[in-house]
Amino acid sequence: MSETATRLQVQLKRPAFELEVDVGWDQRVAVVFGPSGSGKSTLFEAILGLHPAASVRVRIGGLWLDRAERGLHLPVEQRQLGWVPQDPTLFPHLTVEGNLRFGAARARGGGAGSLARAVDVLEIGDLLGRRVDELSGGERQRVAIARALASGPRALLMDEPLAALDLPLRGRVLPYLLRVRDELDLPILYITHDPGEAIVVGEVVVVLDAGRVVASGPPREVLWSRAVLPLSELLGIDNVLDARAVEGAGGESTVETAGGLRLVIPTPLPRGEAVRIGLRAQDVLIAIDAPGRISARNVFPARVARWELHDGDALVHLEVGREGRPPERLVAKITPAAAEKLGLGPGCPVYVVIKAQAIRRLA
Amino acid sequence: MRPALALLLGVLPLAGGAGAGELLVGTAVSLREPMTKVARLYEAEHPATRVRVSLGASNILAVQIRAGAPLDVFVSADEELVDGLQADGLVAARFALVRNRLVVIEAGDAEFHLEGPEDLARPEVRYIAIPEYAVPVGRYAREWLRTRGLLERLRERIVPTEHARATLAAVDYGHADAAIVYATDARVARSAIVAFAVAEEEQPRIVYAAARVSSTPAAREFMAFLRGSTALRAFEAAGFAAPGPAVAEPGP
Amino acid sequence: MNWGELLSITALTLRVGAVATAALLVPSLALGYLLARHEFRAKSVVQAVIALPMVIPPVAVGLGLLILLGRRGPLGGLWSGLGVEVVFTWWAAAVAAAVVGFPLLVRACEQSFAEVDVRFEQVSRSLGHGPFGTFLRVTLPLARRGVMYGTLLAFTRALGEFGATTLVAGILPGRTETLALGIYSRVQLGDDMGALALCGASFLIALAAMLVGEGWLRRGVAPPGSPMSRR
C-alpha cells in the first residue's frame, strides 16, 4: 500500500475484544461508521495515545504520530489532536471561557488566534461567561468542539458529536459541524452510527464491525454495499433494494426493482436513474384481503415465505415479484398476536402496504 | 486561614529536646503539682539549669526509658517499675522519695460521722466505694480491711470502682456513703471529707521512688535536691508524707 | 488553669495539628492518586499497611515511633548525632499525629480521585497539558471537596491524638502538653475544672472544624446534568 495522507494501523487486544485496523485514505474528512461496540471510540483512544499497550502506527494529514519502527511515540499531550469525546466532558470547575482558555493554553502561538476563530465559527461569544452546567446539550457540544479547535490542533477527532442530542437539536448543531469542516482546513475523523450523518459529513467512510474494517471508500458506495448491509439492519434499515426510475412526476417518482417490484417514492428522479432505497420493517404492513381505497401509494400482492419470533416481534419474510423473475425479498415487523390473528403461514397469499414516505433513498 | 497558619508556625520554638543546661524529669502524673513546684524551687537555686517535667503514667515512663528516651530522672509511683529498670542496668541510683497513705472518707453531708474502722460496719453505711483489686490502692485497701477482720463483714457493701478518681466521685455525688482512697486524692474531693486516717502502724508501704537515669552532674544535683527538706515540704503540702524511718535517708 | 495556660495549650494543639496535616498533604495526595489510578500487584498490601495506624492500638504506634526516634533507634540515633532531638518535643507530637492521621487522608484522597472521571484527565492531556499539569489543573480541582474534607478529618484526628503522643512526646506542660494530654493529666489529678475547660476548647475547635467541613460538602453538590452528577 503506497503511503496515504492518513494511515491507521492499530492492534489492541482486550480480554473480550480485539481491535485490528489497517486502513488509509487521502481525503481530508473521514467518517468512521459502525454499530455500537464495534470499536470506534477505542480506535480514537488508540490514535490519541491513550492505550499504551496497543501496537499503533498512525499518520494523520501527512504527519506521523506513532511510528514504532522509528521509535516515534508521541505522548498524548504532544499529539495536538483536537478531541471531542462522545460525552462533552467540559470541565465543570471552569466557565465556558475557562474551558476554552484551558484548550488554548498550550496552542502554538499562544492560542489567541485559534480561540477567537473557534468562538467565531461556533458562535459561542454569548456563552463565554456561563457556567458549564447552565448550557443546553447543543451548546455543550459547540463549546466542546470550540475547545478542541482552540488548542490549535493538527486534526480534529469527533466522536458522535450529535448522538447525545435529540433530533431537532441535531438539525441545529449540524450546520456548525459543516462550518467547521468547510471553513477550517483540518483533517477530520468523525465517528457516527447514523448512515445519513455519514453521507452528509464524510468524503470517505471507514466501516468498522467487531474491531475490524469491513469496508472503506466513498460513503454512497460503501454504506449500502452488501458487506455493510447487515450493519445497516442493526441501524434500523431492514430492507434495502436496488431499483431504477421508470417515471417521475411532481415531487415523486416510480422505481422498479430487478424483480419487477414497482414502488412510488417521495423523491423526484430523472427517468432511468439507478437508486438504492431503504425501508424499515415496521413500516411494511400486511393485509389478507386487498385493501380498498387507501392513502398508502404502494399496495401489491406477495407471498409469505415464513415468519419467526425475534425480540418479541414477529418478523415476516415476504416474497414479491412477477412470474418468471427472481423474487424480491422484504421483511415486515408485526406483533406475534397480529401474525396469529391473520393466520400467517408459509405460502399464504397476502397484500403488502407501504406508505411512500416510509421509503428513504440511500444512494 | 492563612494568616492564622503563619501565626502558628511563626511562634515555633526552635529548641529541640533537652539541650545543654536542661534537665528532663519523668514524673508520675499524680505528682504533677509538687514536682512542678520542686522544679521551680530548684531552678531558683540553680539559675543555669532548666527543669522540664514530663508527665505520664509510671509504666509509660518506664517504657520510654527502655526505648532510650532522653530522661534524666524518673519519679515513679511504683517502686517495682524502678526495680525492673535497675535490674536492666538502666538506673544509676535510686531512693524512696515520699509515701502516700490510706484514708477513709465520708460524704460531707452525711448524718453520721465515722470515728474509726469499726464504724464502717454501722448499718447507716450502705455502700463503700473501693477501687478494683487490680488497682494498687484497691489492693492496699482490701488488705488493710482483712488485717482489721472487716473484709468479710463488709463484702456486701463494697462497690468496686475503676480508679481513684471514680472512687472520689462516688462519694462526692452521693452514690456511696464512704470510700478508701489515698490521702493525696482526698485533698481534691469536692464535698467528701476525710473521716479518719488509717493508723500509722497499719499503713501499707506505698512509696514513690526517685531514680537517676542519666549521669550528668545536673541529674546528680537534682537527685540530692529531691532528698532535701525544701522538696519534702513541697510534697507534704500536697498531702504526701516523708518516706518514714524504715526508708528515710539523711538529707544533704 | 488560667486563660494564658488555656490559650497556650490550645495554640500548641492547633500548631501540632497544622504542622502534622501540612506534612501529610503532599505524600497523601501522591499516594492517594497512585492508589486511585493504578493497578499493581502489591496494591492491597500497600493499602493494608497504610491502614495499620488506624487499626492497631495508638500506644503500639507510639512505642514503634519511640523505638524508631529514640536515641537508640535508627532515625533517632542518626539525628541525635547531629544534635537534633525529636522525642519529648512538640515535633514528636506532630509526628505521632501525622502517623495516625495519614490513613484518613490517604483514603480520602484515594476516594476523591477515584470519583473524578478519567475522561477529564484524558481530555486535558489531549489539549496539551502534561500529567502533572493535568493533576494540578483538572484532577485536584475536581477532587478538592473530598480532599479538603479528608484534610480536615486528619487535622481533627491530629488534635485529639493521645495514645501515641503520650509515649513519644511525653506530657511536658508548656511544651508538648496538647489538649488531649492536658485533659488526661488533669483528670488524673482531680483538677476537674481544668479538665473541663480544656474539654470545652477541644469541643469548640472540633465543632468549628466540622461546621466548616459540612459547609464544604454542602457547596459541593454537583449541578444536575453535569458529567459529574450523571455518574
Image (cartoon, coloured by chain):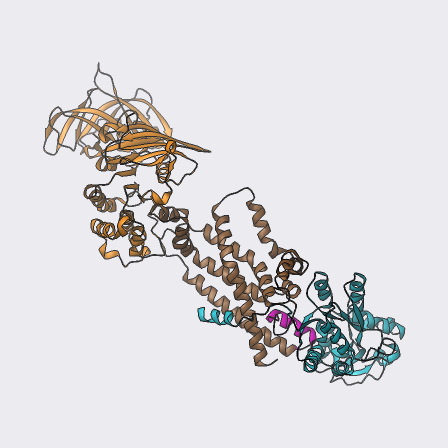
Residue A299 or residue A31, whichever sits in front: A31
Q: Residue at x 34, y 56 (%)?
A: A94
The colour one sees for chain C in the rendered image is: brown
As drawn, C193 above or below A253: below
Which residue is situated farthest in the top direction here? Answer: A324
For the magenta stretch, what is the residue range? C175-191
Quarter of the picture containing the C terminus of chain A is top left
Whether residue A251 is in magenta: the answer is no
Residue A263, above or below B189: above
Pinpoint residue A357: horizontal percent, then vertical percent. Answer: 19, 35
Q: Residue at x 60, y 65 (%)?
A: C93
Provide residue C209's location: percent of width, then percent of height.
Answer: 50, 67
For the image shown, how many numbered marks are present on the structure? 0
Residue C95, how many percent across, how many down? 58, 62
Magenta stretch, main secondary structure, is helix
Picture coordinates of residue C176 (x, y %)? Answer: 61, 70
Q: Is residue C180 magenta?
A: yes
**Which image quarter holds the N terminus of chain A?**
top left
Chain B as rendered: colour: cyan
Q: Is residue B226 left or right of residue A235?
A: right
Task: Answer whether residue B230 is visible to the viewer in this image.
Answer: yes
Q: In the rendered image, which quarter is residue A269 located in? A: top left
In the rendered view, tell whether residue A340 sits above or below residue B30: above
Answer left or right for B210 relative to C148.
Answer: right
Q: Nearer the viewer, residue B93 or C42?
A: B93
Q: Which chain is orange?
A: A
Between A295 and B60, the one lying in front of the other is B60
**Quarter where residue B216 is shown:** bottom right
